[in-house]
Image (spheres, rainbow, N blue to C red):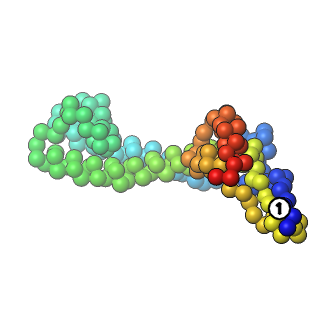
Amino acid sequence: MPPPQVTANVKRGSEVSSGQSPVSGYCANPDNPDIWFVPLRATVICGLYCLIGGLVYGFEQDLSAVDAIYFCIVTMSTVGYGDISPDTDGLRAFTVIWILIGIVAVFSQVSQAVTMYTNVLSEWCRDRIEKMYPPVLVDIDGNGSCDFAMPESPLLYYSKKLGPIGLTDVSNAIPICSHFRGSTV
């Protein structure tokens, strides 16, 4: 039985040109309504949350505007330093409800806006890694077509799954992984 043919000239990924920017895809299109709507919606919801909470805490507990907004943000983020706390049972009940609203409504919107931009960078990094280290394709039956793609090294696999990383980090670790790739373990 002849040994399998190994080729490495077929690449996976979106074939991004080397001069392309990480934000040249989804987020760079000004005609895309999400690029403006999602961050604007997150900003408005966060602003309304701080405004309403600031007014309630400012008037009911006699806090300054800065302290009231600070208290809203600290409680919404569930940090709760304890330097400011509600004085009355009514404010405590409002705070419990306000924390839940902050977690559900505000964090979900802010998270969606941040994810929209970080996904673009993650995809660009994944494409760069795939372009720098294409898979090794194997023709098992000798008919000239790829039957199997050799598994990637764990470092490359998890680097692409974890998101934005420095390509120099991967480049520095590849010689170590290449040593293990040729082993029979």
At x 39% / y 42%, what residue is drawn? Answer: 47
Query: Relative to residue 126, is residue 113 drawn left or right?
Result: left
Front one among 124 and 98: 124
Q: Is residue 101 above or below residue 65?
A: below
Based on the displayed image, in which of its 4 quarters is residue 21 positioned? top right
Based on the displayed image, in which of its 4 quarters is residue 141 positioned? bottom right
Query: Relative to residue 124, is residue 10 drawn left or right?
Result: right
At x 80% / y 60%, what residue is drawn? Answer: 138
Front one among 82 and 59: 82
Q: How many marks?
A: 1
Q: Is residue 34 above or below residue 128?
A: below
**Residue 61 place in picture, x, y as percent:** 16, 36
Few, some or many C-alpha atoms within 10 Å of disc 1 (few <14, some 14-19, many ≥20)? few
**Residue 59 place in picture, x, y as percent:** 19, 38
Q: Which residue is mark 1?
A: 4
Query: Relative to residue 64, is residue 145 drawn left or right?
Result: right
Query: Disc 1 marks which amino acid?
Result: Pro
**Residue 110 place in picture, x, y as percent:** 45, 47
At x 58% / y 53%, what residue is drawn? Answer: 34
**Residue 84 place in picture, x, y as percent:** 20, 33
Query: From the image, which quarter does the N terminus lie in?
Result: bottom right
Based on the displayed image, in which of its 4 quarters is residue 19 positioned? top right
Front one among 26 and 172: 172
